[in-house]
Image (cartoon, grey):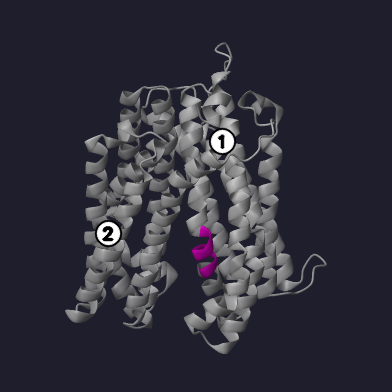
Amino acid sequence: MTTTESASSTESPSKKIEPFVSCASGGIREVWLLSYPIILANISETLLGVVDTYMVGQLGEVEIGAVGLGSMMAWLFYLPFLGLAMGLNTFVSQSYGAKKYTACGYMTWQGIYVALISGVLIWAGIMLAPIMFDLAGPSPEVHDLGVTYLQWRLLDAPGLMVGMTIASFFRGVGDTKTPMKIGITINIINIILNYGLIYGHFGLPRLEVQGSAIGSAIAGLSGGLIYVVLFFRRYLTPFANRTLVWPNRQDLGRIIRVGAPIGLQRFLDIGSFVIFSAFIGRLGNAQLAANQIAIQLMSISYMIGMGMGMAATTLVGQYIGSKQLDLAERSTYSALKLAAGIMVFIGLLFLLFPEPLVTFFNDSPDVIRYGKQGLLYAALFQGFDALAVVFIGALRGAGDTRWTASAAFIGAWLFFLPLAYLLTFTLDMGFWGAWLGATVYICMLGTACYYRFRQGVWKTMVI
């Protein structure tokens, strides 16, 4: 018997917890009530990035280049470990569905220990920052500012990881509103601190790029503290959240086995698009600008689909825990209907109004021409992108995360990138070829995820 089983074996059968979403049916309404707070939190995160970029952009091209490159490198350090935090959702949601409420709190404590260890490991990036920028090879000015930014930006790693872990607990029990409120609060703190520390307002020193990193780090630490405080709130005591438990090697290993592939999958996926953008950057500045605009617009539909996918993770986990596999399947298809409907509609906007959308960001004729090409392809694969993001979320809820990581490696690194390079450079198709390669990859990934879910292997997964 594992420690988790021991903790849950004493569960009182009379203990009753009111559900956070009171329409358990696997239908569209249940998915929407769970997903819209996640979508709003994602939108606020996107807006934060826009505001941060604007504030640093007022300092000059060198500063915005340093922050842009430093932010990307920070995410490369975080991504492999964030999957460990996201993987906790699988354990919490399945325990919640099985009404093993004390196991929810117990596994969250194990997740917190994993988060603290992860945060310390991420701190290694502080020492590796100069080496990373040496490899990137920017100008000396960007190099020095970027190293400073990255080193300060990684200081909040333990707090951020703990916060993400507790956020997975809340989502696992069906409470997506609390992470939304905390996320928006963190972003407001970040904007205020960055404004003060970048420009020297509110009696704070003018630190410019360093101030941007410090403001973001303080906001991340504040978010972790808020999550910890809310985790100990009295209304959560049925989850044994106030009962301190010690690390258990077996259960720590279970979290790592489920969560590590999630982090790897996200790292491989995002990393492939970083290299894809580097391919396009070799074609010229106009192509690179158009590519960034198309990806920025694409991210709007993607984060909506991701909200549906995260809702599917929670619902599939809960229904597996309650041994209602039919509702787990129904909730996944409900999430797909919502995601596909919204994402395909946004794709139609890309198809019908590409020029106004691109012109909003840049009015250069060359950028507009290439941007329209990118949006045409983006419109074509929106439905397949919905398949991928929803079914990956559903498979995570069942613990089938190794397959998704394998699919990302084979699809992105053994197929997508070689194909994009072949079409772009070898066959001299340029921008068209690069985006054609991306379209083929996303269509194949979505189809593969659909068939994996249809196979039903996830119904027999044991975590």
Label 1 to label 2: alpha-carbon separation: 32 Å
Which residue lies at the image location 66% right of the left edge and 68% below the top edge?
152
Q: Is residue 368 above or below residue 265?
A: below
Quickly name the residue at label 2. 410
Q: Is residue 92 above or below residue 354?
A: above
Along the viewing direction, whichever of 53 and 308 lies nearer the viewer: 308
Q: Give the amino acid at mark 1.
A: Met
Residue 380 x %, y %? 23, 56
Tell me: 169 left or right of 314: right
Residue 81 x %, y %? 52, 55
Residue 426 x %, y %? 19, 80
Quadrant where the C terminus is found in the figure:
top left
Which residue lies at the image location 35% right of the left edge and 31% below the top edge?
331
In the rendered image, residue 68 lying in the magenta stretch gets the answer no
**Dominant secondary structure (helix, strand or loop) of the stretch shown in magenta:** helix
| Residue at far bottom of view | 140
Structural crowding at the residue carrying mark 1, measured as other residues with C-alpha within 10 Å and reported as few (<14), some (14–19) or many (≥20): many
The image's mark for residue 107 is 1
Along the viewing direction, whichever of 171 and 50 lies nearer the viewer: 171
Q: Tell me the magenta residue range.
A: 73-78
Q: Secondary structure at mark 2?
A: helix
Residue 74 x %, y %? 55, 66
